[in-house]
Amino acid sequence: MTSLVIAEHDNTTLKETTAKTVTAAIALGQPVHVLVAGQSCAGVAEAAAKLAGVEKVRVADDARYAKIVAETMETLILSLAEGYDALLAPATTNGKNVMPRIAAKLDVPQISEIIAVEGPDTFRRPIYAGNAIETLQAAPGKKVITVRTTTFKAAGEGGSAAIESVAAAPDPGLSKFVGEELSKSERPELTAARIVISGGRGMQSGENFHMLEKIADRLHAAVGASRAAVDAGFVPNDYQVGQTGKVVAPDLYIAVGISGAIQHLAGMKDSKVIAAINKDEEAPIFQIADYGLVADLFKAVPEMDEELAKLGY
Amino acid sequence: MIKVLVPVKRVIDYNVKVRVKADQSGVDLANVKMSMNPFDEIGVEEAVRLREKGKASEVIAVSIGPAQVSETLRTALAMGADRGILVKTDATVEPLAVAKILKAICEAEKPGLVICGKQAIDDDSNQTGQMLAALLGWPQATFAHKLELAEEKAQVEREIDGGLQTVEISLPAVVTTDLRLNEPRYASLPNIMKAKKKPIDEKTPADFGVDVTPRLRVLKVSEPEKRKAGVKVKTVAELLDKLKNEAGVI
């Protein structure tokens, strides 16, 4: 049998989360197809066809998929589900929105946010904000899986999958897309950035996040925040790293004025290198940081900006 | 006016440090403080506000689990829910089975809106609301940031990865809450006393014809790999030197 990966894209660019989900799908040990649902998304389909290990790309190109709502995606995926015994999507807000509907309609449990494939039916996933890891075995039958993409490497290029179109499925007419307000930023996306610099409650205001933005621009980093900083209204929620926000695993995570609550650690502790700046030397963040600097961030961050300038960043 | 159904889950309190059992069979729940799942509290709050604004006629809280979940229901009643439904079982109930029980309750109670937490902070599954919507053939608006109810429809602002998205859904529907939907109230002492007199209807999964036998086998629950604390540096220059020359990440 075959696995189907639901692609994540914006009709122009295939998101890296798809390539990572393909890697998880390949680990199941069966052929991998990718479903691209969108409008005028031929470029996305071509990008998916180039991913190594993908056998076929199926494209539903129709106005109703220009902006995806869960209900239209449900009927499309279900119209194709019969040919597959595993359906996978990245555990993004889109994947999380749609996949449980598929699982429910197929009458199978969903396995959420896997971090490892141990065998064709055995998976590891974090529970309790990553404070415990559950190893699960699925019953025979179809599997519906979302993938925590930070723990899988992106599938490389070099594939040349066939591309075929599939018919659009009926729109149940229950919901409609009204609009969206996306944060505009020249910086890389939080979940895709190689370096992330995040601020916590210690930043004291949204204004002060400009200090972090200056560093971020020098290092081509994304800016994140702890829930405390979001709750205090310093930055919008899409900055949030943690159990209830985004999970990131960059090469370098710089935590500034973040004490290190377990809920925040859940979102960043798989980063390759962690640096922390905090004036409280007892802050729990120092227990997991590779490099800790006990300092007043209002002195240390501007100084870092100057030092980076001197070093030519 | 519509009825609003709010499922509430009893979970380990947000502030408790979770410990994995030595035999790897699960996490240690003995003598641990339990509370209502924080996202469900937001759901109760939103439902009670709808009733207070005259947009809902009744708020019904539902909880599934052992006898102690009645405490969680009492919390919901103290926050302002009108009555409770307790579905008693000692089994581990997976999200799909929860959704099936809730579906049966929805068919009996005919709510216009179900407000679920987006995820429970124990298993972090993020499934139940979506599954319930699919089983009922209803629309959904997950990760709600703002909810505006009109006649037979609702407009919902949703938290998505890059920002916010607005969808319009017909009613009945399922909405799942994100953190910024509202700030739940604390129950006042008089309301806690009043909640003791509010009715709780007791049921079992069998009353709804739902088999709650788990479909996934938990082979083990283990500790995550621990990160070791590294070194303390004295200056910003030293930090940058380490990041550049030792770790090679900048």
Image: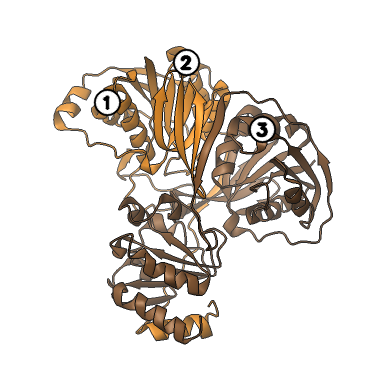
Q: Residue at x 79, y 56 (%)?
A: A50
Distance of mark 2 from mark 3, alpha carbons? 41 Å
Distance of mark 1 from mark 3, alpha carbons? 42 Å
Pick the quarter of the image with the N terminus of chain A.
top right
Question: Visible in this render: residue B238?
Answer: yes
Chain under disc 3: A
Q: Residues within 10 Å of mark 3 (few under 14, many from 20)?
A: many
Mark 3 = which residue?
A64
Residue B77 — which label?
1
Residue type for callout 3 = Arg
Left or right, B139 with respect to B67, comes to: right
Left or right, B225 with respect to A46, comes to: left
**Colour of chain A in the image:** brown
Q: In the rendered image of this protein, does residue B37 appear above or below residue A187?
A: above
Residue type for callout 1 = Leu
- Which one is closest to the eye, mark 2 or mark 1? 1
Q: Residue at x 54, y 66 (%)?
A: A250
Q: Are marks 2 and 3 on the same chain?
A: no
Left or right, B226 with respect to A45, comes to: left
**Where does residue A6 sit, x and y in percent of width and height?**
68, 43
Chain letter, orange:
B
Camera-side residue of A53 and A126: A53
Label 2–label 1 contact, CB within 8 A: no
Q: Are marks 1 and 3 on the same chain?
A: no
Q: In the rendered image of this protein, does residue B144 appear above or below residue A7?
A: above
Residue B207 — which label?
2
Label 2–label 3 contact, CB within 8 A: no
Camera-side residue of B156 and B191: B156
Q: Are marks 2 and 1 on the same chain?
A: yes
Label 1–label 3 contact, CB within 8 A: no
Tag 2, which secondary structure?
A: helix
